[in-house]
Image (cartoon, rainbow, N blue to C red):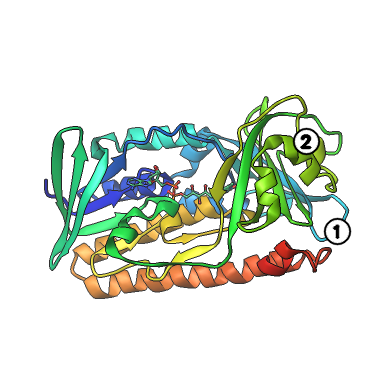
Amino acid sequence: MNTEVIIVGKGISGLILSSLLAKKGIDHVILSRNDNRKDFALSETLPPSTLPLLASLNLLALFEENASKSFGYHSIWGTDRITDNNFFFHHPYKYGLKIDKKRLMNRLAEKVSDKIIDFNFLSKLEQKEHGIIVEILNENETLTVNGKVIVDATGRNRAVLKKLGISVKAYDQLIASICHVPVVKHSKIKHKVIVESFKEGWGIVSSLNEQTNVISIFTNKNNAVLRELKDYQNWKSVLSETSILKGLLSSGTDCKVMGWDANSAKSVKVAGDNWLAIGDAAISFDPLSSHGISNAVYCANAASKAISAHLEGNALTSFKTYDQNISQIFDEYLKHKSMLYRAEKRWKESGFWKKIQ
Ligand SMILES: Cc1cc2nc3c(=O)[nH]c(=O)nc-3n(C[C@H](O)[C@H](O)[C@H](O)COP(=O)(O)OP(=O)(O)OC[C@H]3O[C@@H](n4cnc5c(N)ncnc54)[C@H](O)[C@@H]3O)c2cc1C
């Protein structure tokens, strides 16, 4: 099979890139690995600042159809008081979006269903002077795909970058321990999201639907608390010093805890002669930023422009500019993240806060 662009990964970044390339009439395929692991909802929220980008790409209506509006969040960070961070004063959108990611992804996949090729195993990825050859296996079948450009959209897995031998720099060792728990009503909570820090990390409670909250607790890989967080029965004692989080844990339930990489990381290069990385594969953000999906959409848009220019013959400048642009964004993000963590001064001597700041 011959095509212009091979996208590997059917997450939000890969699907949006596919829809943007389709609009430009650029021939491409999405290679999607069959994954038996059940989709595990993280209950992501998009801040109001992302909505103009979605509107400019004609994606806002689609996102809104598969989301509920979010009017702010509560935080207990750097102080014992609860702060109400209201989106009302944001311009031009006074709300963010709490997306139903599974539904949204299904809608996006439907739009580009003719581009998707499922596979079990990626057996070969070879760079040639004028392109890329990928070989995928399905049961007893082998398919060889020849493309001019390959895009890594495999999230933190970075499957293409690994094959190309591109290394990744991690800036911290943040890990999330995540549980789906029944909703517990709280008199002080009106928003669907609450963030609270504690001595050895921080946590976020984000509503998935009327019945279920997603609780994610973040700490460092080597922190002793991480071992305790593996068993939900210990969460009450780990969070015993918090004001709100401890009250949102349901008692009498035993929830399965999922571990998830949540660190800030960047591949040393996000573009080469005939490849690009987008979304989490290129730069991955700490969930405290709430900007992972905004980044996926931004990268997909920037990549679609770079690919278009590349195919028109501006091969050298377009991918180099993409690399510089995304690297610059990551530098700005690191400054912002550091500012957020430095705002918490209550546990300066704790292992977690010393490392993360
Ligand atoms: C606890 C937590 C909370 C978060 N909260 C928010 C939030 O509130 N707001 C926000 O904007 N972001 C949030 N994020 C981040 C957000 O989920 C990600 O940034 C976003 O999903 C990245 O999209 P992506 O397409 O780059 O990668 P992914 O969504 O990871 O998609 C990658 C795709 O590639 C596939 N894949 C993997 N390996 C291979 C392979 N070898 N071959 C083929 N396909 C492969 C995967 O199956 C998947 O379909 C959160 C993250 C975490 C961990």
Q: Which mark is residue 248?
A: 2
Is the C-beta of the residue carrying label 2 under 8 Å from the nearest atom of ligand 1? no
326 vs 166, nearest the viewer: 166
Position of the N terminus, as image quadrant, is top left
Residue 263 visible: yes
| CB within 8 Å, label 1 to label 2 | no
Give how far across and how far down residue 115 sits, in percent: 24, 40
328 in relation to 243, above or below: below
Residue at the spot 82% in from the left edge and 36% down from the top edge: 247
Give how far across and how far down residue 59 sits, in percent: 45, 44
Q: Residues within 10 Å of mark 2 (few under 14, many from 20)?
A: some
Residue marked by disc 1: 79
Q: Residues under labels 1 and 2: Cα distance? A: 19 Å
Is residue 349 shown left or right of residue 32?
Answer: right
Q: Amino acid at mark 1?
A: Thr
Residue at the spot 71% in from the left edge and 48% down from the top edge: 203
Q: Amino acid at mark 2?
A: Leu
Residue at the spot 77% in from the left edge and 28% down from the top edge: 251
Q: Earlier in the sequence, mark 1 or mark 2?
A: 1
Q: Secondary structure at mark 2?
A: helix
Q: Secondary structure at mark 1?
A: loop
Residue 149 image-quadrant placement: bottom left
244 vs 251, nearest the viewer: 251
Give how far across and how far down residue 131 sits, in percent: 16, 62
Mark 1 vs mark 2: in front: 2
316 in relation to 248, above or below: below
Is residue 120 shown left or right of residue 100?
Answer: left
